[in-house]
Image (cartoon, rainbow, N blue to C red):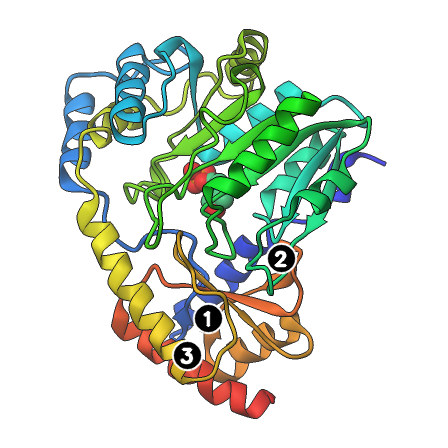
Amino acid sequence: MHPVDLIAPSKTLEVDSLAKKLISEGKDVVNLTAGEPDFQTPRPIIEEAINALNKGLTKYTDSNGILPLREAISKYLKEKKKVQFTPDEIVVSNGGKQALFNAFASILDEGDEAILFAPYWVSYPAQITMVRAKPVVVRTSFERQFVPTVDELLSAITLKTKLIVVNSPNNPSGGIYDYETMKAIADIANEKRIYVISDEVYDDLVYEGNHVSMYGLVDDDLLIYVNAFSKSHAMTGWRVGYVATKNKDIKKRISKIQSHLSSNINTTAQYAAIKACETDNSYMIEEFKKRRKFVVEKAEEYGLSFVEPKGAFYLFFKVKGSDEEFCKRLLSEKLVATVPGSAFDMPGFVRMSFATNIETLDKGLKRIKEFMEEWD
Ligand code: PLP
């Protein structure tokens, strides 16, 4: 069978487009599916893009990304995140999504196994399957706050295991892995010589504790670091992400894939991203903190069962019975759009995004409460 026939279209995008369709029909839908900040991209970033256009910077560029952008990312990672990659170790791609695909395609061969911790972001297994490798799922539990144990990880490793994917802060659970967990995963990867893709696209959005990067924990030649400006700088539509690795062979492969798949990413967006590296985003984080506090308080008041989100912008709550049915009926009967946990391989849960204003969150949560009473 062709590998693409084994994958389904992105469920999160599907439910989001259904909500948007209802909105376009004039329905008062509260859309809590969004995996993107509702803020406008900061003005200085937009101005920089306009400047680039006015200067006529509209041609093809180096397919790895223009050097000034890779230099800016290198400096930004070093100063802001204590993560050190030289411009030569970075490849800019169309969002974190393509950065991840480039990484999977450069590491995985047919039949190789890649370990994912459920709940996981929808596109990981799809991308792994597209390159004819095999996703192997390690299930985490609500009771352990969706953090995997060493034994669970060890029991999933076979001779074919080539890669472990780590996503902290996590979409959809909002959980973050502490130092001990990250170190334990890294130690296993180092000992068994398994690559680690660390998807850190939500690393700026941490509300409790600190973000722990895989950088410095996983051996340099095994680490493939992925990040993007989408969530941190409200730049989802610009499509600027990047992959960084000190493994020269993997880096060479990633560059080749990028060059043949899409050449450089949009030139204007690259100039905008240089500006993003020096643009303060703390006001967005402060606003997210307020929203998270509001959502957690209301969810507690309404008796929802959830693990408090420590990062990202999602509340992942438990529902009885079928989560898919729950989300379908919540949308048709109460006009609230959410994403079923099944989309993230965690049935029995529902993801609501809090990347929207408090008034909308209030309205959405009230409707969820009403619906929960009928559903029970
Ligand atoms: N990784 C995770 C965990 C995500 O949630 C997303 C977006 O939803 C991405 C990667 C991809 O982000 P981008 O929009 O930069 O492609």
Q: Indicate which disc, 2 or 3, sits on the residue closer to the N terminus.
A: 3
Quadrant, the N terminus: top right
Q: Label 3: few (<14), some or many (≥20) within 10 Å?
A: few
- Which of the 4 image quarters holds residue 342? bottom right
How dense is the environment of label 1, judged by Cα within 10 Å: few (below 14), some, or many (20 and up)?
some
What is the quadrant of the C terminus in the image?
bottom right
Q: CA distance from mark 3 to mark 1?
A: 29 Å
Going by the image, does 51 lie left or right of 259? Answer: left
Q: CA distance from mark 2 to mark 3?
A: 24 Å
Q: Is residue 348 left or right of residue 242?
A: right
Residue 357 in view? yes
Q: Position of residue 79 (x, y in %)?
A: 24, 25
Q: What amino acid type is highlighted by mark number 2?
A: Ala
The label on residue 258 is none
**Identity, as a three-letter code, of the amino acid under mark 1:** Leu
Provide the secondary structure element on which disc 2 rests: helix
* Residue 300 disc label: 3
Which residue is identified by label 2? 343
Give the residue at the far front of this rendering: 180
Q: Amino acid at mark 3?
A: Glu
Residue, x 28% and y 14% (percent of image)?
Answer: 71
Answer with the quarter of the image where residue 278 lies.
top left
Image height of 338 relative to 298, above or below: above
From the image, state whether disc 2 or disc 3 is nearer to you: 3
- The reply to whether the C-beta atoms of the residues labelled 3 and 1 are less than 8 Å apart is no
Q: Residue at x 49, y 60 (%)?
A: 16
Residue picked out by circle 1: 22
Reply above or below: 216 against 16.
above
Q: How many marks?
A: 3
